[in-house]
Amino acid sequence: METQNTSSSLYETSIIALRMERQHLTRRANEAQYIALYRDCQPGKSVYWDGFGQPPSLSFRADFDDVEFNRARQYDRRLLKGRFAGGNLGWVTAEDFELYACLYAKPMEAMSRMQTVILELIERIGPVTIHQIREETGLPVKKITPVLHRLQQAFVIYEDQYNGEWDRGWYTMAEMFPEFDLQRYTKSKALEIILRRFAYRMAAFTVKEAANFYKLREREIQSSADALAAAGIFAKSGDRYCLASDAAMLSDGAAEVKRSVFALHANDMLVRASAHMLGRFDPAGRDVLRYLLIDGRLRGIVTGKFRYGPNELDDVITDLCDAEASERRDEILAAIADVYGGRTPARYMGREV
């Protein structure tokens, strides 16, 4: 079957307007809407740097404190921790844990002696903490930790971090989740399910954007997206895919993008998906603290230095023309102040504030 193509081009303004609506950046989500949004934006992550050790958050999306909401979901094990995209830690809903495990599991082809010793210990006396593993085996923590992470990435063991404690128990998957089945979905089927959700929340996407966000090979994304287009679920226009049911709406060009500024962190879905485009902003040897989403487009950065304490705010860099940068100055600084407790950078576009 041939790939379904839209009869006309997708309009950028229509894509952005629908994306902002479905990301709940034009109107914040209530609890039911947030649960659906979170499902589609998984694996969830905490606020980059400033949220280390905190529950995941979808900043600016909820009309309530979603950090505390997700803390309660962690405690009740409605959110489960795993190593997903690129082996990185993330949180997914309990009902989707198998789905993401089937997509991201990195099987153990052969186990080292150390891996075998630690796994057999967990099987025999688990759950165990790293401290207990050290006592039982005599191995130093620096050697135990990578073994646990590799077994975790294979979804052989589970790290039960349901609260904020640092010394948590490690279980075998069979003990923690007796019904868990890594064969429940093929990797291609899992990816098709997840890409449909991604398409809904992004309105339209490129293979590169999906590969950035999910940390998967572009050819895998391309194959699944083309299969969904061949099945009539996706439509394709140029290098973009969208849900076939959205194609007409995105092709009429009638939508308007609401004026807004958000200072997004590096773990935000929109930033992660656009990683390949953000190199155009040169922080000149400084850290990129935040990314500026201006009227639905990533148009700038906040530079400075990450600190264990208040971050050092240095400058604002945008790709706006001089007149627009000047006109939006107060609005942009207010958005930055909103996430930094009223603090703003020392400079704006290279000039002292």
Image (cartoon, grey):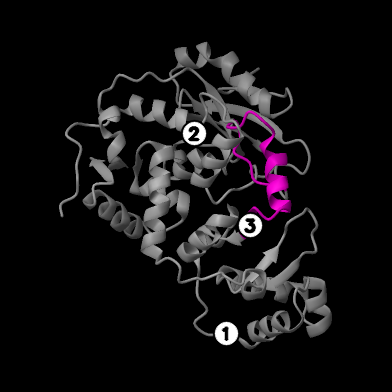
The residue that disc 2 covers is 23
Percent from the top left, x then y, of residue 80? 63, 57
Q: Secondary structure at mark 1?
A: loop
The residue that disc 3 covers is 80
Q: What residue type is disc 1 on? A: Met
The residue that disc 1 covers is 111
Camera-nearest residue between 111 and 348: 111
Verify whether residue 140 appears in magenta.
no
Percent from the top left, x then y, of residue 332? 57, 20
Residue depicted at 66% across the width and 37% down the height? 66
Total numbered circles: 3
Q: What residue type is disc 3 on? A: Leu
Looking at the rendering, the stretch of residues picked out in magenta corresponds to: 54-81
Residue 345 appears in view: no
Outermost right residue: 135
Q: Earlier in the sequence, mark 3 or mark 1?
A: 3
Q: Earlier in the sequence, mark 3 or mark 2?
A: 2
**69 left or right of 200 in image:** right
Residue depicted at 52% across the width and 30% down the height? 24
**292 left or right of 201 in image:** right
Percent from the top left, x then y, of residue 163? 77, 54
Up the image or down, 155 lies above or below 139; here it is: above
Q: Secondary structure at mark 2?
A: loop
Verify whether residue 77 appears in magenta.
yes
Mark 2 vs 1: CB contact within 8 A: no
Residue depicted at 36% across the width and 30% down the height? 15
- What's the CA distance linking mark 3 and mark 2? 22 Å
Camera-nearest residue between 109 and 199: 199
Q: Earlier in the sequence, mark 2 or mark 1?
A: 2
